[in-house]
Image (cartoon, rainbow, N blue to C red):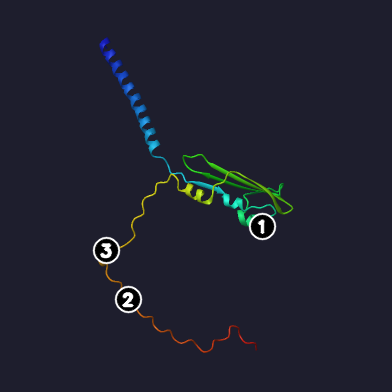
Amino acid sequence: MSDSVRQATRISLLVVICATLAGCSGFEGASLRMASVVSPYRIDIVQGNFVSSEQVAQLKPGMERQQVRDLLGTPLLQSVFHSDRWDYVFTFKRQGEEPQLRKVTVFFNGGVLARFEADALPTEAEFVASLGKGRKTAEAPMLEATEESLKQFPAAAKPAEPKALPPLPATYPPLEPSAP
């Protein structure tokens, strides 16, 4: 083989290798761009007991345990070692946002509410509004039919009159057999 053929073969091989590597990096970049556009749906995760600021505002020292349970619900954490402490923990995780964590701790003394500690809590209206935040909602279609659109449907047939039921018997047989 001559030197010029060898050099041409080397250059051809080098061009093929460079083209292959460029194609791989281009494919990887394209696949990464595609993956960033198409991502799996991740559901919102709500765990624990949601306690609103309105509920905490109703807590008063001296309330009995059952009154607190009626107001706030069953506590998420009840320690065997700390029977006079109830913990209400609430977490809310949504795709693309920082998880929210809120805690309310209730302390009892002799079966009655002594004190409580709570994070900054939203009102019920604020919490409900935050559930729909960031979601795309389509406008609801008009669900009203006009007179013209109703005319294209056949008229509904009147229901038939129900048949008369046979008369009930005057007496019924006994439920248990008679004793001999």
Residue at numbered disc 3? 149
Residue under label 2, please give it: 158
**Considering depth in this image, is 120 or 159 the residue closer to the camera?**
120
Q: Give the residue displayed 27% in from the left and 63% down from the top.
A: 149
Mark 2 or mark 1, which has the lower sequence index?
A: 1
Q: CA distance from mark 3 to mark 1?
A: 58 Å
**Placement of 104 over or under 167, stated as above or below:** above
Left or right: where does residue 31 sit relative to residue 176?
left
- Tell me: 139 left or right of 102: left
Badge 3 marks a residue whose secondary structure is helix
Amino acid type, label 3:
Ser
Q: Amino acid at mark 2?
A: Lys
Foreground mark, 2 or 1?
1
- Residue 8 position, x and y percent, is 27, 15
Place residue 148 in its image quadrant. Answer: bottom left
- Counting from the top left corner in percent of width and height, residue 170 is at 52, 89
User: Is residue 49 in view from this perspective?
Assistant: no
Q: CA distance from mark 2 to mark 3?
A: 21 Å
Quarter of the image for the N terminus: give it.
Answer: top left
